[in-house]
Image (cartoon, grey):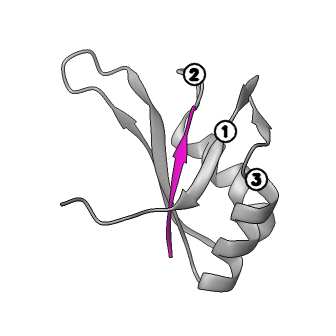
Amino acid sequence: MKLFVANLSFDTKSEDLIKVFEVHGKVISASVIQDRATNRSRGFGFVEMDSKETALLAINELHDSTLQGRTIVVKVATAKN
């Protein structure tokens, strides 16, 4: 299950997301989205967990928690229309 993670510090890297989320289950992939023009973080990213159960656990534990001084938003990713 894919999760949307927002309000990230501009210093947060994909590896940081893996470390935080793998405490709650197996992480398939994690990526912080970069601006194409500046190659700077856009302040959000995606984490894919191995199951719905671990993803929901991660949401419950990490939504509104603090990561690198920022209160992050974690929710189920929705399809881009």
Q: Which residue is mark 3?
A: 62
Magenta stretch, residue numbers = 1-7
Between the residue at mark 2 and the residue at mark 3, the CA separation in whole angstroms equals: 18 Å
Q: Position of residue 5 (x, y in %)?
A: 55, 47
* Front of the two marks 1 and 2: 1
Left or right: 8 in relation to 61: left
Residue 78 sits above or below residue 18 on the image: below
Give the residue displayed 78% in from the left and 68% down from the top: 24
What secondary structure is marked by label 3?
A: helix
User: Do residues under tags 1 and 2 come within 8 Å of each other at their CB atoms?
Assistant: no
Question: Which class describes the residues within 10 Å of circle 3: few (<14), some (14-19), or many (20+)?
Answer: many
Question: Which class describes the residues within 10 Å of circle 1: few (<14), some (14-19), or many (20+)?
Answer: some
Residue 15 sits above or below residue 59 on the image: above
Give the residue displayed 69% in from the left and 84% down from the top: 53
Query: Which tag, 3 or 1, sits closer to the chain's start?
Result: 3
Give, as a three-letter code, the residue at label 3: Leu
Q: Position of residue 35 (x, y in %)?
A: 28, 26
Disc tally is: 3
Q: Which residue is mark 1?
A: 72
User: Do residues under tags 2 and 3 come within 8 Å of each other at their CB atoms?
Assistant: no
Asked whether residue 6 is drawn in magenta, I would say yes
- For the C terminus, the image quarter is bottom left
User: Do residues under tags 3 and 1 come within 8 Å of each other at their CB atoms?
Assistant: yes
Tell me, for residue 11, which label it has, or none. 2
Give, as a three-letter code, the residue at label 1: Ile
Asked which quadrant contains residue 68, the reply is top right
Left or right: 57 in relation to 40: right
Give the residue displayed 76% in from the left and 22% down from the top: 69
